Image (tube, grey):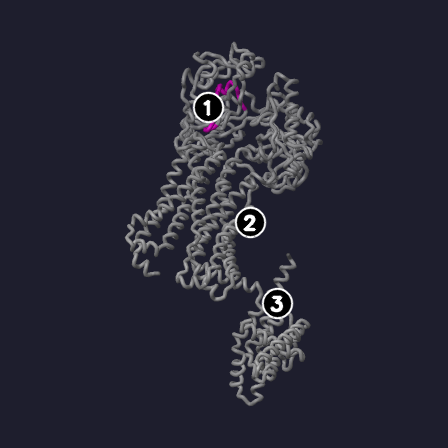
Amino acid sequence: MNKTQLLQGTLDLLILRILELGPNHGWGISNRLQQISNDGLKTSQGSLYPALHRLEMRGEVKSEMTASENNRRARVYTMTRSGRKRLNHETEVWEAFALSMRRVLEEGR
Amino acid sequence: MIARLFATLRGLLGRRRIEGEIVEELYDHLEREIEAHRSRGVSAEEARRLALRDLGGLPQTLESTRAVRATWLDTVWRDVGYGARVLRRSPRFTATALTLLILGIGSTTAIVSIAYTVLVRPLPYADADRLVFLAEQEGSGIAWPNFDDWRRRASSFEGIASSLADAVILRSGPFPQALDSLSVTADFFGILGATSFQGRLFDQSDVRPDAAPTAVLSHAFALREFGSALAAIGQSISLNSGSYTVIGVLPPGFRYMTAAHVYLLLEPQVAANYRTMQGRRNHTTLYAVGRLKPGVSVTSARAEMQNIAAALALQYPDTNKGSGVYVVPLSDRVIGDMAPTLTVVAGAVVLLMLIACVNLAGLLLNKSASRAGEFGIRAALGGSRWDLIRQLLIEQALLVFVGGALGAVVGAGMLAALVSIAPPEMPRLNEIRVDVVMLSWTTLVSGGCAFVFGIVPAIKASGVSGQLVARSGRGSARSAPALRQGLMLAEIAVATVLLSGAGLMVHTMIRLARVDPGFDPHNLQTLKFSLTGPLWPDTRKQVFYEAVVDRLRAVPGVDNAALTYSLPILGSNWWSVFSVPGKSAEHWISVGEFPNAGMVPVTAGYFETLRIPLVKGRYFNQSDTPDSLPVAIVNSSVARKYWVNEDPLGKQVRQGFPAEPFGPWRTVVGVVGDIKQEGIDRATSPQVFMPIVQLPRATAFAIVRTRGAVPLWSLEAAIHDVDRNVPVFNDRTIDQVMRASSSRRRVAMIVLSVFGVVAVLLAAIGVYGVIAQGVAERRQEIGLRMALGATAGQILRLFLRHGLLVVAVGIACGVLMALAAARSLASLVFGVTVTDPATLTAVAAFLTVVTLVACYLPARSATRVDPLEALRSE
């Protein structure tokens, strides 16, 4: 796993986590990302949209253009079943990884 | 297939929609972001700036999002764009490759289309593979009574029909007009499987004795005469001396052997004993065509017909003894003697295509060798091997596609040009068109060649470690030398084959041009005329002959004129057995052959007009009249054969078998020189001439010796001055006849020579390329060697030695291949053997010189390498 893949995977995971709470549009997701991470996990908005579209191409989210306030249309993303599966799987991997890291780091302290 | 197409289309349309939506989505994001900033009290302008900054720039984000959506189609499209740029940036490479492709694909498509149409495609009749041609022997026809017995007795056929090609006179309009006609038995069209375009074709009701005369027209003639096929039905036309009702019109393009304007019934002509058709000995130009029963082979049909012919010979020994039967598939007969020419020409073009492919291969090899650096850098930058191969595939597909499209256009043009120069006797000319299957094949072959020779080295190159290439600076990895030398060898070998074929044909044409025809063939104009029907008793013909000759001689520019029954070069129209006094039939049977000769009724002045030398005695003159002593003039062949060591003058000859004579005894009054009556490439044959006034014929040729150009109309007018109702047709000069008779060979010579020269050129370029590439790759080595004291001669030898070896082996292989292929030229060469050592030696020597020069030029440039500069460039 190289650096770019790790970061990309992280972003995917965060997006899926947000969408688990309910359908949302791009700006909403980006706003949520900032809140969740408390600016600690800074993600650029520029990489958000390619990530969203990639997730859609992979079938892990689906999107729909819906009418929103003042005559605009917004793309609203919803998590699919396969997205939920991935989220669960990756969450487990992360937890296992974090656990191992903590053990190593706290050993002998 | 269609579903896939729709899916792709939907994808393309959907993509445009999605792109618009991405823009909309990003705008939506920006507006929300700006609003959020504004609500925190940021100025409008600042809010905009912040929003754009956080998004990382609108165009960039748009592009990266769109890239996620990109499909394989977008990738291919991008590669096509890049490929086109690469090809545009190296115009010399692209132009050369395209020229090779266009040349190869174009000429192969044109020639192979012709060969395929003429030789392979089934004849345009229903179930044409079951049609066979029948005659009593090769090159002859059948006597009607024999045909009648054949069709009654044979059980191999569903039916046998016969046809007689003829000319009829159309009596409408200001002048009578000669039409080509085909007289056929009532079942002829049924057996061919032809159907009518309008009206109906012949059936048994038309041959009842009380039936009115009927005619079927060709589509073109119906259009010309009546405006439309439908309008022709029920009309009546005057042909010869009768009137015929048009009952049907054939489909456009229908033809059997030769084109005909009108089709008449044969049975009434037989009943009227037209052309003495009821005799068993009269096997003129009546041909038969049979439709085999399903499952019956040509071989078994031939065996049955041979039994029938043998039975007929027993039954009618006087006439049928020794006569047999000739049964071949109809397509063999139609294709006739064009087959060898076409095979040779098609073989030549395939060889040329091969050379073009080999050169293309060499070109692509060089190209990928010189791009090894580029490939290495791309690999080092993370381009996958597949990316690289896909890119090259697309570049080559682009080349092949453009080359194929242009090649098709050029091929169609070449096809039209070839059809226009093709010998008129070439069969099935009207059926020829660009064959899509052939075009696809040639394009596929060149595509395959491009693939193998362009991609394979590229795959190898892509395996080269990027580091290695980057470090070596120029990255011109040594390009597969063995492969390229193999290609060079193949090119030289193929060029040798083509050039020796061309050499043999050139040799043949020179030999033909040197043949002495026995007369002066230049400035001889000929015209054919016809005096048929009850209006022309023999006495009237005799008067007409004399008047016409006088009138023709009076035309300004005419030196001399005469009439004849057979034109020289074109063959005898009348072969006949003859007898001499004191020799019985038994004598000739013991000799093995009855005396026979071409019988040629001519007017006085014939020999003088043609300038045929008199060997002995006298020419015909005004003293030879219808009532004077029947006389004959023989040619030297006859004199030599039948009066060895005797004086032929005063001897007598008579047409027909001893027991079955025809005409009076004729006294030989002169001996003339032999001429090439049967064709310039044939042996001279025995000929017996007699005064045409003593033997009037309905059809004859006027032959006129002119000084310079005499307008044709003045000659026609001279004949019409005598009688304006005589149809005059088929005008040509003897020069034209001679040219036409060698047209098969000329086509073979032209094609082989053009292809041979192109092949040599391509081979020379190929050799030059290989050596030059070697020199370019080894510049530093050369510099080093020179720095270490090597002389220019040593450097030259270094490159020449290797090139010469390949050249020598290539020429040797080529000579062996030429010897193996020689048999295909056997029926085309004349006066030279197909394995003529002189031709092969000359070709080998010529190619050695050309390739030597092609080797020497780049090798010499190696000796001019400046060692300091070469070493510094390392």
Secondary structure at badge 3 equals: helix
Query: Magenta span has B686?
Result: yes
Say if residue B100 shows up in the picture: yes
Estimate the x, y position of residue B782 in percent, counting from the top left.
33, 54
Q: Earlier in the sequence, mark 1 or mark 2?
A: 2
- Residue under pointer 3: B14
- Residue under pointer 1: B684
Labels 3 and 1 touching (C-beta < 8 A):
no
Q: Earlier in the sequence, mark 3 or mark 1?
A: 3
Q: Residues within 10 Å of mark 1 (few under 14, many from 20)?
A: some
Q: Nearer the viewer, residue B521 or A90?
A: A90
Query: Magenta span has B36?
Result: no
- Looking at the rendering, the stretch of residues picked out in magenta corresponds to B679-697
Q: What's the distance in space between the residues labelled 3 and 1, CA to CA?
A: 81 Å
Q: Earlier in the sequence, mark 3 or mark 2?
A: 3
What residue type is disc 3 on?
A: Gly
Q: Nearer the viewer, residue B97 or B377?
A: B377
Q: Residue at x 40, y 50 (%)?
A: B770
What residue type is disc 2 on?
A: Ser
- Residue under pointer 2: B440
Q: What's the distance in space between the residues labelled 3 and 2, CA to CA?
A: 33 Å
Say if residue A62 shows up in the picture: no
Secondary structure at badge 1 equals: loop
Quarter occupied by residue B263 = top right
